[in-house]
Amino acid sequence: MRLLFISGAEIFFILFIVVMVFGADKLPGIAKGLGKGMRQLRDATDDIKREIQKSAEKQGIDTDFTSDIKKEIDEVKKNVNEVTGTIKRSSD
């Protein structure tokens, strides 16, 4: 398993250092604090997204661009299939 270009051995080593520095009894508190911080960050980004969307809607800007992107992707796939459908590979 590779998470952010860090192997399992490196993750284990980092956890070992954390346990040595902070002690096993402090790890649950640290994990709880990290979890709360991540939750606050996610809530803040969600709030910012909502505010941007509200502001765009007030200005009359269409914020539903995902459907437009999906339509374009489908059209490109269709065009690629039309081109590649006529090209046949020979199995020699």
Image (cartoon, helix red, strand yellow):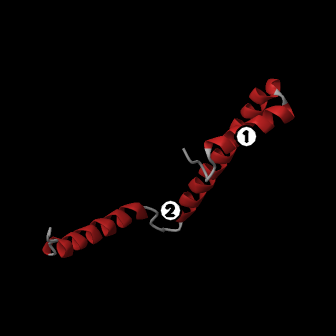
Dot in front, 2 or 1 = 1
Quarter residue 12 falls in: top right
Q: Residue furthest top?
A: 25
Between discs 2 and 1, the one toward the N terminus: 1
Image coordinates of residue 62 in percent, x first then y, are 44, 66
Q: Residue furthest front?
A: 92
Q: Which secondary structure, mark 2?
A: helix
- Compared to residue 13, the image places residue 66 above or below, namely below
Residue in view at x 13 percent, y 75 percent? 86
What is the distance, in whole Å, between disc 2 and disc 1 at their CAs? 49 Å
Residue in view at x 77 percent, y 29 percent? 27
| Proximity of marks 2 and 1: CB atoms separated by less than 8 Å | no
Q: Amino acid at mark 2?
A: Glu
Give the side of residue 17 with respect to residue 65, left or right.
right
Image coordinates of residue 74 in percent, x first then y, are 28, 65
Give the side of residue 88 with respect to residue 72, left or right.
left
- Compared to residue 42, the image places residue 16 above or below, namely above
Residue in view at x 63 percent, y 49 percent? 6
Give the side of residue 79 with respect to residue 44, left or right.
left
Which of the two residues, 70 or 61, is positioned nearer the viewer here?
A: 70
Which of the two residues, 50 or 12, is positioned nearer the viewer here?
A: 12
- Residue 55's disc is none
- Residue 13's disc is 1
Q: Amino acid at mark 1?
A: Phe
Image coordinates of residue 38 in percent, x first then y, are 68, 43
Q: Which residue is mark 2?
A: 57
Q: Which secondary structure, mark 1?
A: helix
Which of the two residues, 37 or 54, is positioned nearer the viewer here?
A: 37
Which of the two residues, 30 or 84, is positioned nearer the viewer here?
A: 84
Q: Residue furthest right?
A: 21
